Amino acid sequence: ATEAIPQPSDKTMVFGQDTLGGDEEGSADQAQISQKVPQETVQQTINTGSQGRVTGSDQVVISSPPKSSFKPILIGAGALVVVLLITVVGGVGAYMMGLFGGKKPINGGPDTTPTAVIEGSPSPESTVFKADMVAIPGGTFTMGRDDGQPQERPEHQVTVESFEMDRTEVTNEEYYQFIVATNYKAPPHFVNGKPLPGKEMNPVNFVSLEDARAFAKWRSERDVVEYRLPTEAEWEYAARNGSQDSLYPWGDEYENDRAVMGGLQTVEDVGTNSKGANKWGVLDLIGNVWEWTSSESGSYPGSEVQIVGGVQVTRGGGFFDKTTGADAITSTFRAFVPQDTKDKTLGFRLVK
């Protein structure tokens, strides 16, 4: 008999007995997992640290991103004098000095946040980030594993074409250049639209699927190359070292100095753990932030677990997640998240 999982309430995803909520705006998307194996539940959540695991009820709720406690910096100025010079020989020239608004943000409405210069934070004019891509030859590999979580089963053969992948997750500073170029709305942890000094090389977080795709569109136009989010298969192929089928990008055993994870309270600069690279040199595939993929949720072929679509697959685990035990984050671990979720544990990288 099929064991039915109770329907979730609004803004809540149910995966076995664990739940994952959206941000303040919420999400109408819902997914239900039913199983043919009695009493076997899918432990499928993103642990959000200080935002809390509710013990007893075994729930994880992603609350809305924290609001910045910084007040806008107001810059006072004296009145501007408008000088009108009228010449006698038929020419009238009027020159007026003032401030003009920029473009509207892509995601609607003029961005009225005052812009302030924070000392120590590089400006987009002084630093231009170019894509650092790693070539990954295509091939066939084993996707999923039979001894993993129910949503990782069964293992099956998948072939991917050659592609290139960002060496690291997209950083705050690179995302800031996108904000400046397009007047896109900044993530809530930016101050006056800029990353805090010293945090420029942290992976950007608090970004939804739409935000990640908007960034990819901008970078594609800038570099005249088509960038996109990786498919779930491409991501796992890179993390498993292709046909080597590694459980982690660096091998088959977890090692503490190879990933930014394990109950930490915050992210670290991309590439901090250089020994955690895969065989092609891609960093941070495990740890730091979970990474959006372009693939929607779904069951693997022949799976005994029915996973309804409509939410997005994220991969790689984050700084707060477990490193050992049944819920350990590996190269095969899958998480499903509503597309409009914005959380401190969510970021991304691009491929082409």
Image: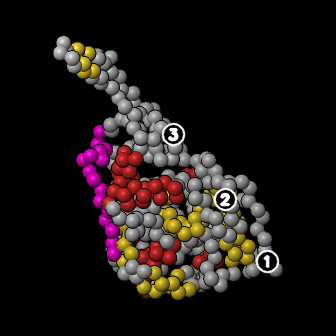
Q: Are the two marked residues, 1 and 3, in contact with CB atoms closer than 8 angstroms? A: no
Outermost residue to the front: 90
CA separation in Å, label 2 and label 3: 25 Å
The amino acid type found where label 3 is placed reads Gly
| Disc 2 element | loop
Any mark on residue 29, and which? 2
Give whichever of discs 1 and 3 has the lower sequence position: 1
* Residue 90 locus on image (x, y percent): 21, 17
Of discs 2 and 3, which sits in the foreground?
3
Residue depicted at x 39% and y 79%: 162
Q: Are the two marked residues, 1 and 2, in contact with CB atoms closer than 8 angstroms? A: no
Q: Which residue is mark 1?
A: 2
Q: Is residue 29 visible?
A: yes
Q: Which residues are magenta?
A: 119-135
* Residue 35 locus on image (x, y percent): 73, 76
Quadrant in the picture for the C terminus: bottom left
Secondary structure character of the magenta stretch overall:
loop
| Disc 1 element | loop
Query: In the visual, does 55 lie left or right of 88?
Result: right
Q: Which residue is mark 3?
A: 109
The amino acid type found where label 1 is placed reads Thr
Residue depicted at x 28% and y 53%: 128
